[in-house]
Image (cartoon, grey):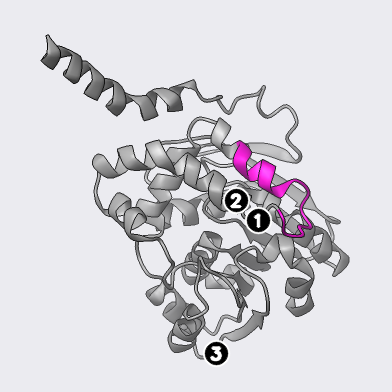
Amino acid sequence: MIWVLICLLVLGVAAAPYAAERRRLVMDDTARADAPGAFIDLKHGRTHYRYFGPQSAPLAVCVHGLTTPSFVFEALAEGLVAKGYRVLVYDHYGRGFSDRPTAAQDREFFVSHLDELLNALGEHEKFLLIGYSMGGAVAAAYTAAFPQRVQQLMLLAPAGMGHELGTLAKFIRMVPAIGDWLFMAGYGRSHRKGTEKERALRSAVPFVVDRQQRELQYRGFLPAVLSSLRHGLRTRAKSDHETIQAAGSKVLAVWGAEDDVIPLSCKEKLARWNPEATQVVVPDVGHSLPYTQPEAVLDVVP
């Protein structure tokens, strides 16, 4: 009898993170009722997007990172409009108001999503492409694949050149099943703790911490982040940046001097991969460039 109880206890513990995931809210029409912007149905599901600025202005496209959806660009988008741009932001699948497909979120997944969105919206002219954090790796991959579409690539604390995952995160990324369970059981707590550290920071995006933590309420967010860690952020972006350099595409990279997510040492790696890239370091700021220091970013926007 004792062994039966032990087995039931083990099964209960094993199933708990997945049961919790099933209890989370579904991203449906009710959840999207207060969403700004618009939606479009694409290959992998419904995508949330939003335009800022006049239709006649040149386009800037902003690609967000691993966990914080497109609202991370709200202040930056308004500043770009003031500089004469029309701005498009969108939510990756699994984040914000977009759908939650189960496909592996690898390099091709992100590049095809962006390309499909642009084509569906009728955006065929050259544009300024801005990528933040993981979005920097996505933007670089897109530019390498479609250099003729990108007027200039602007990278904000970009991933793809090395990032500080920590021992446990590396184990989770490399080991299926057990890693999945550890992630589903513990990442929510880690996400809240990490975002809570920024609550005291001045933010140009209202309620940014609360909105980041709100992502945990919805089913599909955790699996999307895990899939991106395991696939999209697993490979280095060296070949993409070398392709960009060979194509002669203009690149501007902006780094936070105190970034503990994408270390400043990555600046030197980008310099080796693309010696033609222009690089700027913003002092006294961490990984939160778009929402805590949008003015510093806007100062160097072409």
Q: Is mark 2 on a helix, strand or loop?
A: helix
Instruction: Check disc 2: other Cα within 10 Å, few if <14, some if 14-19, many if 20+.
Output: some
Labels 2 & 3 near each other (Cβ < 8 A): no
Residue 181 pos. (x, y %) = 31, 37
The residue pinned by badge 1 equals 198
Q: 20 or 82, which is in the foreground?
A: 20
Residue 208 lies in the magenta-colored region: yes
Image point 55% across, 56% down: which residue? 65
Instruction: Check disc 1: other Cα within 10 Å, few if <14, some if 14-19, many if 20+.
Output: some
- Sequence order check: which comes first, mark 3 or mark 1? 1
Calculate the distance from the C-alpha at mark 3 to the C-alpha at mark 1: 34 Å
Q: Which quadrant does the C terminus fall into?
A: bottom right
* Residue at the outermost bottom position: 275
Amino acid type for the residue under numbered disc 1? Glu
Residues in magenta, as a range: 200-214
| Residue 141 left/right relative to 96 | left
Q: 116 or 241, which is in the foreground?
A: 241
- Sequence order check: which comes first, mark 2 or mark 3? 2
Q: Which quadrant does the N terminus fall into?
A: top left
Instruction: Please name which of the two marks, 3 or 1, marks the residue nearer to the observer.
Output: 1
Calculate the distance from the C-alpha at mark 2 to the C-alpha at mark 3: 35 Å
Labels 1 & 2 near each other (Cβ < 8 A): yes
The residue pinned by badge 3 equals 276
* Residue at the outermost front position: 2
Image point 17% across, 19% down: which residue? 7
Q: Is mark 3 on a helix, strand or loop?
A: loop
Calculate the distance from the C-alpha at mark 1 to the C-alpha at mark 2: 6 Å
Residue 90 lies in the magenta-colored region: no
| Residue 270 left/right relative to 252 | left
